Image (tube, rainbow, N blue to C red):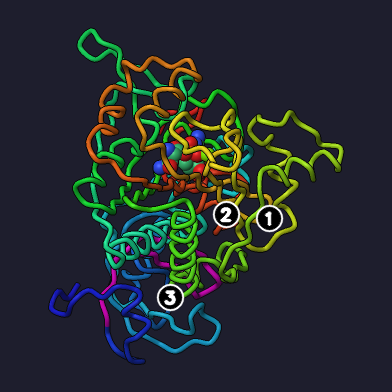
C-alpha cells in the first residue's frame, strides 16, 4: 500500500473530488457479496462510506483480502472516489489496495442474537458501535459542548467539587456509603453545596460532574451514576434562576438542532425548537388537576410519576412546575414569603411524558431559618456544619439548578430508557461492562 498521501477521514472523503485516489481507515460495519461485486460499509470516527471491489476491475489479491475482512475488523485501504447515486451520501470508494489491521471474530451483535435488551447491555462494550448508539453519543457530546459554551459566554466560572463527601445533600435514602479510613463517607449526590461556597469567590459558577444515587427502583429514568450540569449564582432570585434555565436549555437545543440533524434522523426523531418563555404551572395547580382527573395524591408529597407523566404527555414544550411544598423538598430551599408552606423551587419538565430533567431553586441564605429547617427535617446539623457556617460570612440571596445530562439526552433523542443515554450505564442491576 502507498503511504505517501495523507489518510482522510470519511467526512473529508465525501468532500474530495471524483476520481481522486484517497486513503481511508476504519472498521467494516457491514458487508455483502453480490455476484462479482463486493460491497462494504466503512465506519470511522466521522461517519460511514460505501466501499466496493469488483471482480475483473479490482486486483484479485485485493478482492481476496476484502473477502477476509469480517464485520468489525479494522482496516486500511486506498481507492478511487466515484459518484454513485445508489450509495448512501452519493459517493463510493472503489478499492485499489486493502489491508486488515486487526481482524474481528464473528460479530455477536446480530438481529437474531439480540433476543433481549439485556444481551445488548451485557455486550455494551461492543454494542456501542451501533449506528443508533453512536448517534445518541454524538448528540450527548453536542449538548455538553453547548452547555460549556453557554456558561463561558455568560460569565460562569467552571469549578470542580469532590466526589467523596460526608453529607447528604439530597436525602439519606439514596446514598452510596463507603469506608473512608474508618469513617463513613458517601459518593456525592449533587455538587450544589460546593457551588454555594464557591459563589462568594466567583459569583457565578457551573460544574459538570457525575452524581450518584442508590436508587432502589428499576425505572426508565433512573441511573445510579449519572452526569449533572449544575449552575449557581449569587445575588439571584428564583425568577432569575428560571430565566437562566430556559435560556440555557434553549441555546443547547438550538445547537443540537443545528449540529445533529443526521443523528436525529438516524434515531427517527423529529425535534423542533420550543419557543421561549417556557410555560409555568404551580404545584398547587398540578395537584388540583390531578385530583379532578381521579389521580389524587396527598398535598405536600412529591409528584407521583403518573401525575408528572399525565401533566406532560400531551405538551410539546418543556415547562416549569413551581412552588413545591416545603415537605417535598430539601431543607435548603427558600420558603415563599406569601405562604411559608411553599418553597421558591421548580422542576423543569420535558414534554411528551419524559418528565423531570432539572430541579432548582433559591436557597436559604439566613442561618436562623436554615437551622430551623434542619431541625424540622430531623437532620443532624453536625454533617452540615461548613454549609451552615457559610451563612455567617456574607452569603447573599442566591439560586441555582441541576440538570441531568442523561435525562436530557433521553428526551432529545426520544429514547425509551435512560440506559441508552449513557455509554456504560449503571443501574440497580448493572455494574458491568
Ligand atoms: O432533582 P435533583 O435531585 O436536584 C439536585 O440534586 C439539586 N441539588 C440540583 C441543584 O439545584 N444544583 O437532581 C437534579 C437532576 C434531576 O432533575 C434529574 O435530571 C437528574 O438530576 N437526576 C437523575 N438522573 C438520572 N438518574 C437518577 N437517579 C437521577 N436523579 C436525579
Ligand atoms: Mg428533582
Magenta range: 22-44
Q: Residue furthest bottom?
A: 18
Residue to which mark 2 is pinned: 411
Among numbered discs 3 and 2, the one appearing first in the sequence: 3
The structure residue drawn at horizontal position 80% and vertical position 34%, both measured from the top left corner, is: 296
Cβ of disc 3 within 8 Å of ligand 1? Answer: no
The answer for how far apart the CA atoms under marks 1 and 3 are is 43 Å
The answer for how far apart the CA atoms under marks 2 and 1 are is 8 Å
Image quadrant where one finds the C terminus? top left
Q: Callout 3: 10 Å neighbours few (<14), some, many (20+)?
A: many
43, 165: nearer the viewer: 165
Image quadrant where one finds the N terminus? bottom left
**How far across and down, in percent of the image, does residue 391 sit?**
29, 33
424, 99: nearer the viewer: 424
Q: Callout 2: 10 Å neighbours few (<14), some, many (20+)?
A: many
Which label was assigned to residue 52? 3
Residue 30 in the magenta stretch? The answer is: yes
The answer for how far apart the CA atoms under marks 3 and 2 are is 38 Å
Residue to which mark 1 is pinned: 352
Q: Secondary structure at mark 2?
A: helix
Mark 2 vs 1: CB contact within 8 A? yes
**How far across and down, in percent of the image, does residue 355 sit?**
62, 47
Q: Secondary structure at mark 3?
A: strand
**How far across and down, in percent of the image, does residue 219 sit?**
61, 34
The structure residue drawn at horizontal position 18% and vertical position 77%, both measured from the top left corner, is: 6
Amino acid at each position: 500500500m502507498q503511504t505517501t498521501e495523507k489518510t482522510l477521514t470519511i467526512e473529508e472523503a465525501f468532500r474530495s473530488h471524483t476520481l481522486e485516489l484517497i486513503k481511508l481507515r476504519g472498521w467494516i460495519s457491514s458487508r455483502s457479496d453480490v455476484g462479482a461485486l463486493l460491497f462494504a460499509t466503512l465506519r470511522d470516527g466521522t461517519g460511514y462510506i460505501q466501499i466496493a471491489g469488483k471482480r475483473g476491475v479490482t486486483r484479485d489479491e485485493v478482492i481476496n483480502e476484502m473477502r477476509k475482512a469480517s464485520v468489525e475488523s479494522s482496516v486500511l485501504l486506498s481507492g478511487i472516489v466515484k459518484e454513485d447515486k445508489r450509495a448512501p451520501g452519493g459517493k463510493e470508494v472503489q478499492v485499489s489496495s486493502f489491508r486488515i489491521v486487526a481482524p474481528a471474530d464473528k460479530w455477536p451483535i446480530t438481529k437474531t442474537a439480540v433476543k433481549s435488551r439485556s444481551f445488548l447491555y451485557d455486550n455494551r462494550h461492543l454494542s456501542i458501535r451501533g449506528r443508533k448508539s453512536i448517534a445518541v453519543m454524538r448528540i450527548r457530546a453536542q449538548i455538553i459542548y453547548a452547555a460549556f459554551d453557554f456558561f463561558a459566554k455568560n460569565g460562569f466560572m467552571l469549578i470542580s467539587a469532590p466526589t467523596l463527601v460526608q453529607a447528604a445533600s439530597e436525602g439519606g435514602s439514596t446514598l452510596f456509603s463507603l469506608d473512608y479510613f474508618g469513617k463513613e463517607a458517601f459518593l456525592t449526590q449533587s455538587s450544589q453545596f460546593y457551588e454555594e461556597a464557591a459563589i462568594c469567590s466567583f459569583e457565578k459558577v457551573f460544574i459538570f460532574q457525575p452524581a450518584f444515587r442508590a436508587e432502589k427502583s428499576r425505572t426508565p429514568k433512573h441511573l445510579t451514576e449519572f452526569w449533572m450540569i449544575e449552575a449557581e449564582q449569587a445575588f439571584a432570585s428564583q425568577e432569575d434562576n428560571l430565566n437562566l434555565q430556559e435560556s440555557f436549555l434553549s441555546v443547547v437545543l438550538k445547537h443540537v438542532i443545528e449540529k445533529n440533524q443526521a443523528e436525529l434522523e438516524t434515531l427517527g426523531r423529529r425535534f423542533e425548537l420550543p419557543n421561549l418563555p417556557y410555560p409555568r404551572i404551580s404545584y398547587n395547580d398540578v395537584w388540583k388537576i390531578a385530583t379532578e382527573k381521579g389521580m389524587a395524591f396527598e398535598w405536600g408529597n412529591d409528584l407521583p410519576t403518573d401525575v408528572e407523566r399525565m401533566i406532560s404527555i400531551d405538551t410539546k414544550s418543556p415547562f416549569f412546575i413551581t412552588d413545591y411544598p416545603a415537605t417535598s423538598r430539601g431543607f435548603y430551599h427558600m420558603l415563599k414569603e406569601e405562604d411559608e408552606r411553599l418553597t421558591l423551587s421548580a422542576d423543569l419538565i420535558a414534554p411528551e411524558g419524559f418528565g423531570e430533567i432539572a430541579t432548582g431553586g433559591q436557597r436559604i441564605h439566613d442561618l436562623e431559618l436554615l437551622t430551623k429547617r434542619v431541625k424540622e427535617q430531623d437532620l443532624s446539623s453536625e454533617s452540615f456544619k461548613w454549609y451552615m457556617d457559610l451563612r455567617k460570612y456574607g452569603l447573599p440571596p442566591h439560586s441555582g439548578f441541576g440538570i441531568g445530562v442523561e435525562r436530557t439526552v433521553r428526551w432529545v433523542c426520544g429514547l425509551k430508557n435512560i440506559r441508552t443515554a449513557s455509554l456504560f450505564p449503571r443501574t440497580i442491576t448493572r455494574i458491568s461492562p
